[in-house]
Amino acid sequence: MSGFLLPFLKVKKMQIGSVTTPFGRRPMTLALVRRQVETSSIKPGKTADKWKVFRDASEARALLGLQDRSLAVLDALLSFYPDNELRQDAQLIVFPSNAQLTLRAHGIAGATLRRHLALLIEAGLIVRKDSANGKRYARKDKAGAIDSAFGFDLSPLLLRVDELAMMAQQVVADRFALRRAKENLTICRRDVRKLISAAIEEGASGDWENIEAMYISLVGRIPRAPTLSDVNSILDEMELLQQEIINILEMQQKGENTSTNAAHSERHIQSSKPESIRELEPSSRNEQGAKTVDDGRPQREPVRNFPLGMVMRACPEIAMYGPGGTIGSWREMMGAAVVVRSMLGVSPSAYQEACEVMGPENAAAAVACILERTGHINSPGAICVTSRARPSGANFHWDRFLWRC
């Protein structure tokens, strides 16, 4: 004898009497035997709202292997049970004909009805209790109460009420997790696409063609109806790709910042020589809070400043002494003039006095002109002294030199 049937030899007589076989050619399986025996072990006094159970079964239909038409048939079966509550001590067998079921199941075909009844039995939600001739009917006693009935037993629904509720909760949780994962994948996919496009359009360094190919490959792997595991797998890879792109851009930004800081430090060192600090921004003899001292020198009209562009066109040689080999402002011009002044042998005091008389911009322009004509000048220092004494310059008219250019 099969070992599977041994536990059933010890069941009560009520349980043995509740096990029936299908009518006609329908096969009998050991799973059907197990389900029929389990329905006899429902706890006494157990009740459940039949429509609550139906909603839970509807939520868990994917886990149960049911289709929408199967639920329509189950809804029709439950409608033949007169009470709203399924009770352990009540008669839970309904016995509608196929014609009645077809009407309440929205007019489905007979073959479709039979197929979905079989699915409900296979899912363990109902059990057949066939009569001797396979007909569905009820036999009543003298008082008019149902004594015995043959049809479909709804006891498995009452037995599995807690299990169905847990399955429904799991389906709802999985659906929420899937929706959240899809949202995260959509956001991550958008970020990666826009980061790649921005990097390519702005010429950022990196193998962006290969990265874009990886992105297209990931997007192409998203199925039409993805499961939670599918979405999570692709999301993990997409987030790794996003992090790699961000790391590349951050490293490039750090490199640019380092280069900028190095250039700034070099400029700062160049302009922070002991003489440069004082010479780059010449101090006035009449500083704020100081008393005016009349040294007997005649007051001179200030010489007007020339445009920086004119000075640079006339004296391009001084540009190589600017920060980065270029001069773009008068401040950079004055810094370059300090460096050139020391090369030409002009003393700091002479240059300082020239700045006070001519103005720092004109003094820097004069140094640029002297540098440009250094091959024709024997004593640049003397020229600077003459320039500070007479802004027009007795021996070297630097302003006329600018005008000629």
Image: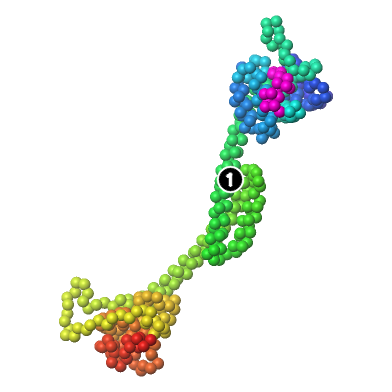
Q: Residue at x 24, y 77 (%)?
A: 284
In the image: residue 312, left or right of residue 353:
right
Colour basis = rainbow
- Look at the picture and state if 10 lies above or below 192: above
Range of magenta residues: 93-108
In the image: residue 196, left or right of residue 369:
right
Q: Nearer the viewer, residue 272 or 256?
A: 256
Is residue 225 covered in magenta? no
Q: Nearer the viewer, residue 382 or 298?
A: 298
Q: Residue at x 59, y 25 (%)?
A: 52
Q: Nearer the viewer, residue 236 or 345?
A: 236
Question: Which residue corresponds to mark 1?
Answer: 182
Q: Is residue 30 visible?
A: yes
- Look at the picture and state if 234 lies above or below 145: below
Where's the C terminus, which quadrant?
bottom left
Residue at the top extreme? 142
Instruction: Indicate the quadrant where residue 318 lies.
Output: bottom left
Q: Residues within 10 Å of mark 1 (few under 14, many from 20)?
A: some
Residue 185, horizontal then vertical, whole percent:
58, 48
Q: Secondary structure at mark 1?
A: helix
In the image: residue 225, left or right of residue 131:
left
Label 1 amino acid?
Answer: Lys
Residue 289, horizontal then vertical, whole percent:
19, 72
Is residue 94 covered in magenta? yes
- Look at the picture and state if 172 lies above or below 284: above
Residue 134, horizontal then vertical, whole percent:
79, 19
Q: Residue at x 28, y 78 (%)?
A: 282
